[in-house]
Amino acid sequence: MILVKGGVTTAIGFHASGVKAGIKKSGNKDLALLYSEVPAIAAASFTKNRFQASPVKISKIHLKNKLHQAIVVNSGNANCANGKKGDKDALLMASVTAAALGLDKKEVLVASTGIIGKYLPVNKIKNNIPALLRGLSKDGVGFAQSIMTTDTRKKELAVKIKLGRSTVTIGGACKGVGMLHPDMLLERHATMLCFITTDCSISRKLLNDSLGEAIEDSFNMVSVDGDMSTNDSCFVLANGLAGNKKIVSKGKDYKIFTEALKYLAKELAKMLAEDGEGATKFIEIKVKGAGNAAEAKSVARKVSTSNLLKCAIFGGDPNWGRVAAAAGASGVDFDPDKTDIYLGDVLVLSNGASVKGHDTKRTAKYFRQKEVHITLNLKAGKAEARAWTCDFSKEYVEINSEYST
């Protein structure tokens, strides 16, 4: 696998664009389009929040279609909690885009992010669809910026892999730095939106399976504030233009493709945590020695959502007691008297007891760094998991106390 510069347009046959439609008060870009030159198969995953936004509901319906060729996205307005009108507006976004591209509306997926409970300015969207089409290009200028809300920087990545004699590319772009605690399920997780493209030839079922595997260890393990969004969505389009032998079984090629997709998803997930609203520090929680993978994830996830711990890290206070308390509240049955906790490489809890004489000055200095790693060893098995989050700063409160004004 080779890491390459790029994003959603790096794979063969994909074009993208982004424009200013006047949806955001800031005047920044807020309408984006992703397009495949040829019909593609799609897989997607959405929030488990019961209050699902209208674009989530419409995209779920459109995913029943066998092929898809475009995704239209707006930022600055979530189009959520708007009743039947919201559903109609989301469908209108897809329909107008489809008509302009000469497609059936069911071949277009839709996503939105922004403020909940305000009607979508559909006329602004309709009026700017022609500009979106004119701006479609291989460099995808504006797409990653147009999907941003309170993000401070765009988040995109691409990788290349060899499948037989063919080179396959996977590229992606995502956004989300607040109201971010995805828990997504395949049609079977501000808001996390992710768009992934690939020129790989793969069956629709296996694309769904691969995405499911990738999400579990990436986006479903990142949290900024513990609040699950109404709009969380992760899409992947595969158009088959790489010319590889079609992946129809979970053999070698499937494993290579899935490992690459997992890598891409994990790196994008880390970008989300690093750019959390008001974040000054990136935090990785590693749990090892768990009885099984589910238990490892539960403990890591619980620790990563501890507001007390996140505040302590912001203040540079190596209060590992908050790590222990969060782990113990995870609901996982482990033995505290066997548990170790490390702050960086400093052992602070050994077999359930505080390590007397550990270097507190060293841990305090470590917690003032931009990147903090915390490890828990439960000594109950061999399973491991990692979760990513950020600290809670005063700026986070400021951002979210003024967000809708």
Image (spheres, grey):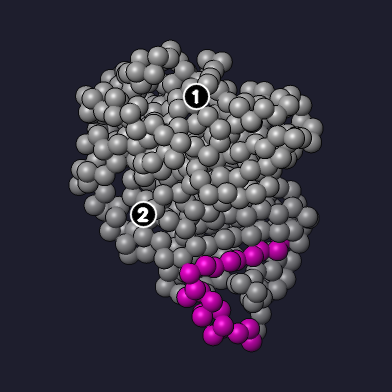
Q: Is residue 299 left or right of residue 128?
A: right
Q: CA distance from mark 2 to mark 1?
A: 31 Å
The quadrant holding residue 285 is bottom right
Residue 52 is at least partly visible in this image: no
Identify the mark at residue 133; answer none if there is no mark: none
Q: Which residue is pictured at 72% across the width and 71% down the height?
A: 351
Q: 237 and 61: which one is in front?
A: 237
271, above or below 283, in the image: above
The quadrant holding residue 128 is top left
Q: Which residue is pictured at 61% across the width and 50% down the height?
A: 3
Mark 2 — residue? 152
Q: Is residue 376 magenta?
A: yes
Q: 129 and 286: which one is in front?
A: 129
Q: Is residue 11 left or right of residue 276?
A: right
Q: Is residue 266 left or right of residue 336?
A: left
Q: Position of residue 396 (x, y in %)?
A: 34, 58
Q: Please give the range of residues in magenta.
A: 357-378
**Three-letter amino acid code at disc 1?**
Glu
Q: Which residue is pictured at 36% across the width and 41% down the height?
A: 142
Q: Position of residue 237 (x, y in %)?
A: 54, 29
Q: Is residue 137 magenta?
A: no
> Are circles 2 and 1 on residues that touch, CB within 8 Å?
no
For discs 2 and 1, the disc positioned in front in the rendered view: 1
How crowded pointer 1 is (Cα within 10 Å; few <14, some 14-19, many 20+) is rated as few
**Three-letter amino acid code at disc 2?**
Thr
Q: Secondary structure at mark 1?
A: strand
Instruction: Identify the mark nearer the N-term, 2 or 1.
Output: 1
How crowded pointer 2 is (Cα within 10 Å; few <14, some 14-19, many 20+) is rated as some
Mark 1 — residue? 37
Residue 306 is at least partly visible in this image: yes
Q: Is residue 161 left or right of residue 187?
A: right
Q: Which residue is pictured at 65% across the width and 36% down the height?
A: 168
